[in-house]
Image (tube, grey):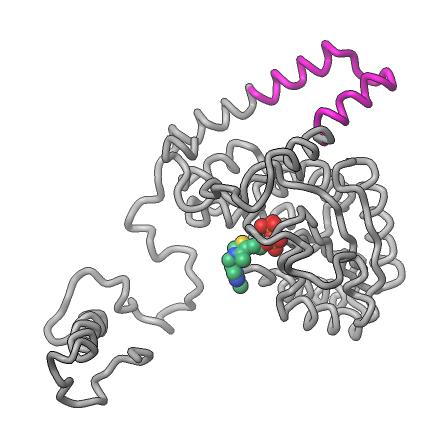
Amino acid sequence: MYAKAKVGGFLHLSIGEEATIVGSVRALRDADYLVSTYRSHGHALARGTHPDRVMAELFGRATGTSHGRGGSMHMFDGERRFMGGYGIVGGNLPLGAGFALASDYLGTDDVTLCVFGDGATNQGTFGETLNLAALWKLPIVFMVTNNQFGMGTALERHSAQTDLHRRGEGFGVPGMRCDGMDVLDTHAVIGEALRRAREDRCPVLVEAETYRFRGHSMADPEEYRSKEQVAEWRERDPIVGWAARLVEEDVMSEDDVARSDAEQVERIDHGVTFADSSAFPPPESLYDHIYVIGDQVRRPWWSVDERGEGVHRGEDEKDMAGRLGARAAGHEEVSGDASSAPEGAS
Ligand SMILES: Cc1ncc(C[n+]2csc(CCOP(=O)(O)OP(=O)(O)O)c2C)c(N)n1
């Protein structure tokens, strides 16, 4: 659907990370909070958001989880306490601490699960948030989805300490590690981390070791890793491995597995039909659901299409760029009132 231009913007797939997502999210109670990253459609599905609504959000339609305004990076389901996907790497850590602080303040025993990538552990927000979470004894589990790469940069090229579960030690945050390719191990370790956070009132850092089978996003030529490495990890495909185990332990037959697989494909096809037949948000709803209270902020200049008299800031900026360009080329001296230069024009 992305290749058919049905999905706009970027799209970050989670193929290969299914056990990490399902094992961790299914260890949560309904009242617990979950916050994730731009790789978030899997988290919404595991939390119980209807697949039709997830697909509709990917398609940017009004029936999507964020009314089509978020797209693939911004799934959201407040009802299920899935507090969203976020595009800023490391940006969801302070938000997660905020949810945990709210739970603590209200005296509930709800825990927050805050999910982010290995690359995010090098952001300042990681240290800042772990420090405060430990100091304030917040009920939060930080889960690093270590899929071995931050975009095209391998773990050992971006971190001196590659045992990421140890990265909280200096802040007083205990660490645990799970096999992110094994849904049961992930579920058990995250379950224990959630218990500690809930009962002992302390943050815990869990590292889930996994791998993304596809590129960073759909627009990734994958020049930073070998086909052999991908093939090696694919041998541990968490879905295939889980099915094999269920058959081996007589929980399901081969036929049950095939039937279940067909049912899921049908479910996805239904989502595609639903999304494709849903409307885009109407243009007149452009100002709905935006973070503005009453008339505190008037229609901003960058979204106004009906121009009044006089110079507009956008035009001024455009004009300025041309004049600065000409000066750089040595053709013309910029003259006139310097105070008319827009902020940040340098
Ligand atoms: C603050 C910030 N810097 C840079 C980017 C660009 N960027 C998008 S994804 C990404 C890599 C993050 O890797 P990781 O945290 O390991 O998550 P993964 O993509 O592996 O799930 C970068 C650098 C961004 N979105 N936000």
Residue 83 at x, y percent in the picture: 60, 53
Residue 316 at x, y percent in the picture: 19, 75
Q: Quadrant of residue 310?
A: bottom left
Q: Residue at x 55, y 50 (%)?
A: 152
Q: Is residue 288 above or below residue 7?
A: below
Residue at the far top: name it.
Answer: 255
- Whether residue 2 is in magenta: the answer is no
Viewer-proximal residue, 17 or 91? 17
Q: Residue at x 81, y 69 (%)?
A: 137
- Is residue 220 at all visible to an observer of this figure? yes
Q: Is residue 325 above or below residue 23?
A: below
- Whether residue 257 is in magenta: the answer is yes
Viewer-proximal residue, 65 or 96? 96
Viewer-proximal residue, 317 or 313? 317
Task: Tell me if 113 is positioned left or right of 67 in this view.
Answer: right
Task: Tell me if 275 is positioned left or right of 116 in this view.
Answer: left
Task: Tell me if 342 is positioned left or right of 45 in this view.
Answer: left
- In the rendered image, which quarter contains the N terminus? top left
Q: Is residue 122 above or below residue 211?
A: below
Residue 177 at x, y percent in the picture: 82, 50
Q: Residue at x 66, y 37 (%)?
A: 229
Which quarter of the rendered image does ligand 1 occupy? bottom right
Principal secondary structure, stretch drawn in magenta: helix
- In the rendered image, which quarter contains the C terminus? bottom left
Q: Quadrant of residue 278?
A: top left
Q: Which residues are magenta?
A: 238-265
Please count the marks in the image: 0
Q: Quadrant of residue 341?
A: bottom left
Viewer-proximal residue, 50 or 107? 50
Q: Is residue 63 above or below residue 276?
A: below
- Is residue 78 at all visible to an observer of this figure? no
Residue 321 at x, y percent in the picture: 21, 73
